[in-house]
Amino acid sequence: MPRRALLAAAMAAIVAVGALAGLPATAAVGDGSPTDPNVKFVGRWDTSSSSRYVSKWAGAYVKVGFTGRTVRLKQRDAIDFFASIDGGPDVAYKNVSGTVNVTPTPLAAGNHTLRVSYRPVAGSYHGDAVYQGLVLDAGAQTFAPPVAPRTIEFIGDSITVGQLSSKQALTAYGWLVGEQLKVEHTQIAQGGACLVATADGCVGLSVQFLKTGAEPASPDWNFARYRADAVVINLGTNDSGHGVHTPEFQATYVTLLERVRQKYPNAVIFAMETFRKRFVTQTQNAVTARNNAGDRNVYFVNTEGWITESTDTADNVHPNDQGHRKIAERLAPIIAARL
């Protein structure tokens, strides 16, 4: 047999062995660094430095497949995060830094997946939500993890962040809906945020939706990084406390709906009635205005009776774990019917 044919046969045998072992034949081999193509970043991440990627907004997460029995996460300074191995429970790691072992009990040899979500950095909490890469076993490598073909984006305030729920973003209704529908998901949300940017400093999501993060000087987000198939907006709870009046709220809501449509031409958009019943008419009117302008893929979501403040919230405002589950149970089929 000619030498070229022998080489081809040998390569085919190697590929076949890899397939039998469960290794993705087409996946690039990587070391788990931020630029490793097998590491998948969901949500908005600041990637301006190739040595570290910074998680922005709530609900952003990283997914990666790896071989071997252990995996360690390289952190810079102290941060809280949740890690899930092989689709298992999200385990909390609090105030950790340096090289963090997320497999204290070694795994069975073979292929595994890791998902990491950092605690949202907002308000009085100032952690270092920085992904610097992985430390793998000798001879181990990464591979591309399963990634859902669809993404839902949730835009909101502390309720969408999951503030006062047990695992914050991970026990918030947006995360729960995404997991239930088996899609990727991200929460463009900030505690205390308004729809309208106000003179007294309330972060206005109608503006910050276009940005990489919640900081006023945050750079514009590159919307080519991903396309949302559905967008859910839950805003208005905080605006009245910052002097926003109804005509301004309605006009700004229309502007946000227009911006979402511009960035996601094919997405279905849902405007939720706030659970505290604020600016309900104005939210409905904004949806109607967009419908009348020819955008029929925008819907108002009536949330009457979804939760009871006395039992489903932690403080009559923020849903507890039970409240978020109830919201997700109501919202998921509404979204699924339109996707």
Image (cartoon, rainbow, N blue to C red):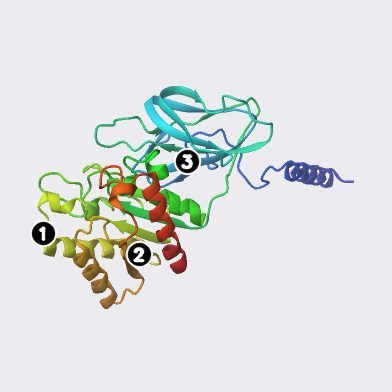
* Vertical order, 56 against 197 (above or below): above
* Residue type at numbered disc 1: His
* Residue type at numbered disc 3: Val
User: How many C-alpha atoms fall within 10 Å of the one at disc 2: few (<14), some, or many (≥20)?
Assistant: many
User: How many C-alpha atoms fall within 10 Å of the one at disc 1: few (<14), some, or many (≥20)?
Assistant: few
- Per the rendering, the mark at residue 245 is 1
* Vertical order, 339 against 121 (above or below): below
x and y percent of residue 266 in the render? 40, 67
Residue 59, can we see it?
no
102 sits to left or right of 310:
right
Circle 3 sits in a helix, a strand or a loop, which is it?
strand
As rendered, which of 95 and 37 lies closer to the eye? 95
* Vertical order, 135 against 6 (above or below): above
The residue under label 2 is 269
State the residue at coordinates (31%, 41%).
Answer: 163
* Vertical order, 171 against 290 (above or below): above
The residue under label 3 is 62
* Whether label 3 touches label 1, CB < 8 Å: no
- Per the rendering, the mark at residue 115 is none
* Residue type at numbered disc 2: Ile
